[in-house]
Structure formats: structure tokens, C-alpha cells
């Protein structure tokens, strides 16, 4: 069965600190996609990244970076030099026959 | 690109009335649209999946007669909450998946429903 675990419920960091959000998944599919979405207080989910199961290259986009480790079934998300605007709930998701969302990690960046 | 709109963004209604929420993909054709419900401080719960021109597939425990979903075109899906009650108050979010972008769902801004 597919499952996404985000063990960190809430994280608080001081502005400019780096923070890593963990995501561990379970799937029996050989081909799947992993996603990260950001949900700011306004409620709208913002697409951040999609990663195909065959592409284990890490990705960097500005202050954001993602580490995909198939061996440990993890797809962690790091924000470097965090800013107050990064405060949001972040969801990791996995495709199967539907979208499986993790329970989300609420990140608070303190000025 | 990949913009999804929802209307209304917020609605307050009396118990017993029906509420229609629209979800539109503005710059792409959405072969599949999804409707989610989110309670405060919780994750998204998939309610149903709809493909254009066919009946929606509802998740277990979701009343299809209460939550009517119509996906009449490649850019529009509607969710009607019939005879709404206070327990239906929630944040409803739609998402859309295009024909050519693999597996990615783009989400609307959500609709906050409050039933008095």
C-alpha cells in the first residue's frame, strides 16, 4: 500500500537558518512520482517540485533543494537561509492510483 | 501557466441550502479534476475524481448524493454540496491534471464553506 510519512509535525527556525523537511514514502510501484507542495496561510497549494522515480538526481532551485534517496525511500526538502515568507505547511505527496499526501509539516520562520 | 481558479473563495449559507463551487483550469485542458476536503490543521482528504464527460469516482465514505460533481468540459468541474449542514463546513480544494504533464496536479485556491 502507498503511504507518505512526514514525521515532523511542526518546526520552528530563526530566520536565515537552514531547515530540512523529511518525507518517507512506501510504494510497491516501480514507476511513481513524488511531489512537494507549499500551503501558505492563504490556503492555496503551490506546486514546488515533481520527481520521477527513475530520476535520483538531486535538484536545487534557488534556496530550495531536494534530496531523493530511493534506497531509503526518502525525498527530503531543504530550505537554505530561511525567510519569514517560507512560513507555511509543506506537504509531500506520492502518486499511485491516486495522490497520497503526507500529513504535512508546519514550518514557522521567526524573524 | 497551469492556473486553476475556484469560485467562490468563501461562502456562508444557512443549513439546508445547496452550494455550488466551480473549479476552472484557465490555461490548460484538464482531463482529470479532483476534489479535496481539508479540516483545520489536517492533510487533504480526497473526495472524488472526475474525468471530463464521465461520472465522478467517489472515495469510500463520501456520499455521492450529497456531494454532486459534474465535469462538463475540459476546463470546468463543479461540486455541489446539497442540503448543507454545519458538519459540511470545511475548506474545499479542487485540483486539475492536464493531458500532457505527467501526474502533476495543480490546485485551486480553495473555497471556505461555513454552514450556519
Image (cartoon, coloured by chain):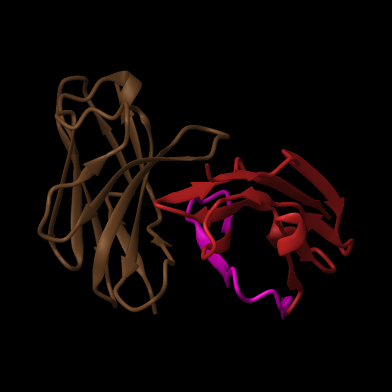
Chain colours: A red, B brown
Residue A87: image location, x then y, percent = 70, 54
**Image: A16 above or below A60:** above
Q: Is residue A61 left or right of residue B105?
A: right
> Looking at the figure, which quarter contains the C terminus of chain B?
top left
Residue A88: image location, x then y, percent = 65, 52
Tell me which corner region of the image, top left, top right, bottom left or bottom right, holds residue A7.
top right
> Looking at the figure, which quarter contains the N terminus of chain B?
bottom left
Q: Is residue A42 left or right of residue B86?
A: right
Does A50 lie within the magenta span? yes
Does A87 lie within the magenta span? no
How many numbered dots are placed on residues in this image? 0
* Residue at 46 percent of width and 54 percent of height: A96
Residue A83: image location, x then y, percent = 77, 63
* Residue at 14 percent of width and 29 percent of height: B65
Q: Which residues are drawn in magenta? A: A37-61
**Image: A66 above or below B69:** below
Residue B104: image location, x then y, percent = 44, 67
* Residue at 18 percent of width and 32 percent of height: B64
Q: Is residue B59 left or right of residue A103?
A: left
Q: Nearer the viewer, residue B3 or A3?
A: A3
Tell me which corner region of the image, top left, top right, bottom left or bottom right, holds residue A72.
bottom right
Amino acid at each position: 500500500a502507498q503511504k507518505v510519512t512526514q514525521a515532523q509535525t511542526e518546526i520552528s527556525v530563526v530566520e536565515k537558518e537552514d531547515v530540512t523537511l523529511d518525507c518517507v514514502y512506501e510504494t510497491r510501484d516501480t514507476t511513481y512520482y513524488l511531489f512537494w507542495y507549499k500551503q501558505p496561510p492563504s490556503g492555496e497549494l503551490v506546486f514546488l517540485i515533481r520527481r520521477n522515480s527513475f530520476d535520483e538526481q538531486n535538484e536545487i532551485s534557488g534556496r530550495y533543494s531536494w534530496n531523493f534517496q530511493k534506497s531509503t525511500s526518502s525525498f527530503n526538502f531543504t530550505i537554505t537561509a530561511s525567510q519569514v515568507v517560507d512560513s507555511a505547511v509543506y506537504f509531500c505527496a506520492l502518486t499511485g492510483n491516486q495522490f497520497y499526501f503526507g500529513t504535512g509539516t508546519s514550518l514557522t520562520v521567526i524573524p | 501557466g497551469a492556473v486553476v481558479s475556484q469560485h467562490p473563495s468563501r461562502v456562508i449559507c444557512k443549513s439546508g441550502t445547496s452550494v455550488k463551487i466551480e473549479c476552472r483550469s484557465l490555461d490548460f485542458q484538464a482531463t482529470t479534476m479532483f476534489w479535496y476536503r481539508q479540516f483545520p490543521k489536517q492533510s487533504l482528504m480526497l473526495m472524488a475524481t472526475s474525468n471530463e464527460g464521465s461520472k465522478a469516482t467517489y472515495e469510500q465514505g463520501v456520499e455521492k448524493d450529497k456531494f454532486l460533481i459534474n465535469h462538463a468540459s475540459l476546463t470546468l468541474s463543479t461540486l455541489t454540496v446539497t442540503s448543507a449542514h454545519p458538519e459540511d463546513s470545511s475548506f474545499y480544494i479542487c485540483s486539475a491534471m492536464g493531458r500532457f504533464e505527467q501526474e502533476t496536479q495543480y490546485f485551486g485556491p480553495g473555497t471556505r464553506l461555513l454552514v450556519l
